[in-house]
Amino acid sequence: MRFPAAILLLLLAALTGCRAMPAPLKLEPVKTDAIIAKAAAHDLVPVGKYDPSIRQDLRYSTTSNVFGRVLYPAGFPALATGPTAKKLAAANRALKPHGLRILVLDAYRPPEVQWQLFQMFRDDKFVADPRKKWSKHCYGCAVDITLTDLSGQEAAMPSTFDDFSKKAAARYTGTDPAIRRRITLLQKAMTDAGFSLYEDEWWHFNDLTRPALLNGPPTHGATIGLPSSN
């Protein structure tokens, strides 16, 4: 039996899990408080809600990232699910006696941006392919972080953020004892708080304690008030 081309395309889409990808966000500035208010309805809160000493420097809000592109509008806050933010606060409290605290580089990532990232770097070892599954960042239960001292001075770590090389691995193989100590302290604080490591990225930690969350659709940026280019 021969099927019309349109039906064949539909069948292929069903078999491969093909779905429409979201348009990029507009990069016009947003009002942080308004985004936080709308995000609360989707269980997304500021990463520092339970510990204001946690700082943020969202690298995709600037050109200081491996792609050299701004992907988040100015004013976009670092967000995470409520339980994830609580775990992050617990980890930060554990680090402070060692003279360290957490700096958030990325947290909740709108699906609109995830699709852009994958188009720029098509290696799902480092950037999740939305055609297969959404990144845990898109659900607010993954964070990319580094360490600072208590004054806010960023500490030396094994590599820069989004270094897609062997230096990015969670298992530190370098020779600097200070970096080894910081990585060990960071990983212990995060795993004790309930996060899991990602072996290919020392800065990436997942909160996998709510698996049902990942079975549903992610929260799109447009849903919490980020302007879409659609």
Image (cartoon, helix red, strand yellow):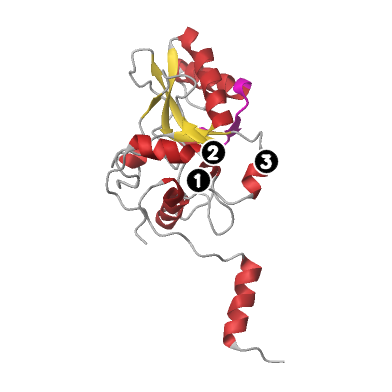
Q: Residue furthest top?
A: 97
- Are the residues tagged 2 and 1 within 8 Å (C-beta)? yes
Which stretch is magenta? 192-204
Q: Quadrant of residue 163?
A: top left
Look at label 1 and name its amino acid.
Phe
Q: Is residue 31 above or below residue 92?
A: below
Q: Position of residue 97 (x, y in %)?
A: 49, 7
Secondary element type, mark 3: helix
Nearest to N terminus: mark 1 or mark 3 = 1
Q: Which residue is mark 1?
A: 126
Look at label 2 and name its amino acid.
Asp
- Is residue 197 rendered to the left or right of residue 22? right
Q: Which residue is mark 3?
A: 211
163 or 62, which lies in front? Answer: 62
> Is 195 within the magenta?
yes
Q: Which residue is mark 2?
A: 200
Q: Position of residue 144 (x, y in %)?
A: 47, 34
